[in-house]
Amino acid sequence: MIFDKQDLSPELFLSIYGTKADLQSGCNSAEECWDGCESWKTSYPQVPYYPFFGPKYEGLLFAGINLNGGNESFTAIDELVENAIDDYLKQGKFKIFKSDHYGGSPFYYYVPLISFLYHEYLTGKPLITNEDEISFEQIISGFQYCGLTNVIKCSTNSEDRRSKPTEAMYLNCSKKFANEIQRFGCHTLICFSFFLWPSFRESLGFFQNLISRDRYQILQSQRINILELEHPLSTQVTREEKFKNYSKGIFDLVQLTKKR
C-alpha cells in the first residue's frame, strides 16, 4: 500500500522519537546521543521533520545522513527542495546552496537526477553513461517521483563543520528510521551512507547482499530493496566517474527489481 501523505502529523513522530518539539532534549535517546558533545548542540530547537514527497511518489525514498542545520520546522525538507529547484537547478547550477561562507553541495542535484534515471530505467531505457545527455529540466522532474528524508534527524555543530553525527546518533536514530520506512510505504531506499557507516544495514535488520561494487551495493529484504551509494561529498572520484557509478547502481537495482 502506498503511503498517504495525509497521514503525516506531529503525533507520528511523537510515537517514534518520544518528542515533537525538540530532539536535543526531548528525544527518548537524547541523553545517550549527546553525551560528551554538549558543545555541538545548536542554539535552536530541532524537530523530527517530515520527509519531502513528490506528487508522483510511489515508494522510492532517498535518505541522506542528516541536515547541516535548518531542521527547525516540520517542513524543513520541503523548503530546501523548493529553494534548490527555484534558486539553483532552474539556473543550471550544480552546487546547491553555495554562498560566500559555504562551497555548496551537489546533493540536491543528484537526488532528482538519480530519481529521473530510476524512472527512465523502469520504462526500459538503456543505461546512460554520459551526464550531458540529461537536461536540467529532466533532472528537476525527478523530484516528482521520489521522497527525501535523512536517517538521522539531529544536526550537530561538530568540529568539522559538516554536522557529523556521533556514533550513538547513528545507532539510535537508524533504528527509529526503520520504523519510519514502514510508515512511508517505501519499497526502494536509496541511501548515501556507503563508506560513511558500514554497519548501517545491520541496524535495519537482515538484508541479503545481492551486488557489491567498489562504490555501491544493493541489498534486499522481504519488504524493501536498498541501494547504498557513497555521499556526493565523500567521493574521491571525478564527477564523470561518479555519474557512471550512480547511473550503473540504479540501473542494476531496477533490473533486479524487475526479476523479483
Image (tube, grey):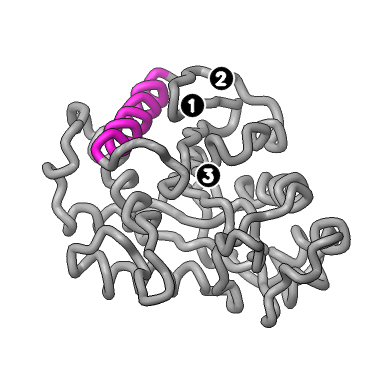
Q: Which residues are magenta?
A: 240-259
Q: Can you see residue 59?
A: no
How many numbered tags mark residues here?
3
**Quadrant in the picture for residue 250:** top left
Q: Is 84 above or below relative to 249?
A: below
SS for dot 2 = strand
Seen in the image, is 238 located left or right of residue 7? left
Q: Is residue 116 left or right of residue 187?
A: left
Label 3 with label 2: CB-CB less than 8 Å: no
- Element on which disc 3 rests: loop
Task: Find residue 72 and report its horizontal and vertical position in percent.
Answer: 60, 78
Of the numbered discs in the image, which one, if any, rests on residue 217? 1
Residue 110 magenta-drawn?
Answer: no
For the question of whether residue 4 can be seen, the reply is yes
Report the Cα–Cα distance between label 3 and label 2. Answer: 19 Å
Question: Disc 1 on helix, strand or loop?
Answer: strand
* Amino acid at dot 2: Asn
Q: Which amino acid type corresponds to the residue marked 1 in the rendered image?
A: Gln
- x, y percentage for residue 81? 39, 67
Mark drawn on residue 209: 2
**Residue wearing tag 3:** 186
Mark 1 Cα shell of 10 Å, populated few (<14), some (14-19), many (≥20) = some
**Of callouts 3 and 2, which one flags the residue occurring earlier in the amino acid sequence?**
3
